[in-house]
Amino acid sequence: MPTYRELFTHREFRFLYAGQVLSYLGDQVAAVAVAVLVYDRTQSALLSAVAYASAWLPGVLGGPILSTYADRLPRRAVLIGCDVARALLIALVAVPGLPLWAAIALLYLAHLFSPPFVAARAAIMPEVLPGEAYITGNGLSNITHQLSQLLGFVAGGVVVAVIGPVWSLLGNAATFALSAALITIGVVRRPAALTGDGPQGLLAQSREGIRYIVADPWLRTCLALVWVASGFSFAPEAIAYPYAASLGGGPAQAGLLLAAPSAGFMVGAILLTRVVTPERRDRLLRPAAVLSTLALVPALAGPGLTVLLVLLVLAGAGASFLVPLNAVFVRRVAPEFRGRAMGVAASGLLVVQGLGFLAAGAAVQAGLSPSTVVGLSGLLGTAAVLGTRFARDRVEAPTG
């Protein structure tokens, strides 16, 4: 397996990776800023969750369709266009005096550009990193994502407390602009993956991509496990600020609650992609998926901050089973379908996480304590994960 250092001998990867780091860090700071901005203005856990879910729910509005552009158009152009659009829209959210409903609407509009961006980036990576370098690069990208969440959420709580949510959002807009510039400079132009063969309409091509996934039993069951586990295991993020407030804390404590799962995920991803053998990794995927939700169940007892952080770290470590599955998923899909397949996968993930965020916020708003909501998420999630076929059957890498 290539080392992490060897990945940076590929010029395009260096620029894509630098842009990824910038935008990820900005996103995590902005996530804390949005939660604080809305909750401080409304004192509503539900509205805070609605705003926080803006990074996820737009996938249900058109993610699978919009991600088709990652196959229809040159993927470099899709990446640049999405970054520029998000930079402008997030900057508008920070306009002083903007009504809250308008700010939330702009957040949702900005995040409509996330599914095509994620699809285009995932689809182009096997072309940037050949062979086994892609497996290593995919692992590094996921680890970097979690590390940026760890640092961004911890720093985000402090940054928002010091400079306020408005300047934090402007910083997030700047990271998108810098990412677009890096991609413009460092990524080569490639033609669109789709040719003149097959259906030509946007909707027809979107349906073709969905049918491609549905026709493959392994892809179907893989997505089922990923979506079910993620919908429950990440739901507590939406109520991190109200949870911290219930424990007598503020933005800094909320940042710790958001960072803990990322720390666990990062450690688990390193173990699964760089330490254990492929055979042992396959045997660990099922128990890891169960751990991602089971670790949340003890929150029903209402533990203090320290114990809660340990539980969230364990849940994040279990959720790292997503990393090796993602690499196998992308490599299985034919190149001309990768944008659409990853769009469906990413959009479904955004949807289930967004619904989980809304459910968690609504439960707290209805009167349940945050600890009860987290514990119930773990209990229901464990039952759902154990009920998936992929969790019961032996995990095997597909052939062909």
Image (spheres, grey):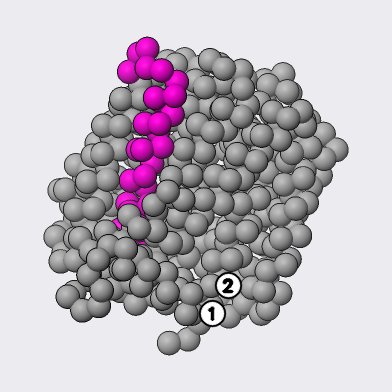
Q: Is residue 343 left or right of residue 79?
A: right
Q: Residues within 10 Å of mark 1 (few under 14, many from 20)?
A: few
State the residue lying farthest toward the top.
97
- Badge 2 vs badge 1, beta-carbon distance below 8 Å: yes
Q: Position of residue 27 (x, y in %)?
A: 42, 36
Residue 73 visible, this angle: yes
Please tell me which residue lies in front, 352 or 198: 198
Q: Which mark is residue 217?
A: 1
Q: Is residue 214 left or right of residue 205?
A: right
The residue that mark 2 highlights is: 221
Residue 139 visible, this angle: no
**Amino acid type at image mark 1:** Pro
Q: Position of residue 62 (x, y in %)?
A: 39, 52
Determine the residue positioned at 66% across, 79% down.
Answer: 394
Quadrant containing the N terminus is bottom left
Q: Is residue 117 left or right of residue 31?
A: left
Q: Is residue 50 above or below residue 388?
A: above
Q: Main secondary structure of the magenta part?
A: helix
